[in-house]
Amino acid sequence: MRIYEALILVKPDLNEENLEKEMSRLSQSILQNEGKIISFEKWRKRPLAYKVKKFKEGIYLLANFSANPPVIKEIEKNWRLDENVLRSMIVVKNKK
């Protein structure tokens, strides 16, 4: 298993309760694909450099998790289909 880091941009109009539900859904997509969550944290609402899906700002989430490389495409697909996710990026985290 490799360690990954994901930065996820979600809609800024989510209230605190819906944001918690969204974080839970995103976590579940990792766990359903046999991944293990190391940390999952909410950053804050930030303005964007350009509009993304008609939004001028977004809420950033940072996830660190371990998973097998073949399931990353499935996790990315699940996140792309989520209506609250504006953008996401998953990268392999280097070991030091």
Image (cartoon, helix red, strand yellow):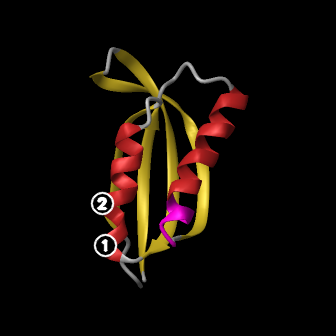
Residue 60 to residue 35: above or below: above
Identity of the residue furthest to the right in this view: 17
The residue where tag 1 is placed is 70
Q: Position of residue 28 (x, y in %)?
A: 58, 55
Q: Which secondary structure, mark 1?
A: helix
In the drawing, does residue 23 fall left or right of residue 8?
Answer: right
In the image, residue 34 lies at what x, y percent? 51, 72
Determine whether label 2 and label 1 are within 8 Å by CB: yes
Magenta range: 30-34
Residue at (38, 17) in percent of width and height: 55
Q: Left or right of 74: which side holds 15? A: right
Which quadrant is the C terminus positioned in?
A: bottom left
Q: Residues within 10 Å of mark 1 (few under 14, many from 20)?
A: few
According to the image, label 2 marks what residue? Answer: 73
Q: Is residue 2 above or below residue 74?
A: below
Please, what is the three-letter code of the amino acid marked with disc 1?
Answer: Pro
Residue 23 image point, x, y percent: 60, 44
Q: Is residue 32 magenta?
A: yes
**Residue 60 tag number:** none
The reply to whether residue 87 is visible in this rendering is no
Q: CA distance from mark 2 to mark 1?
A: 7 Å
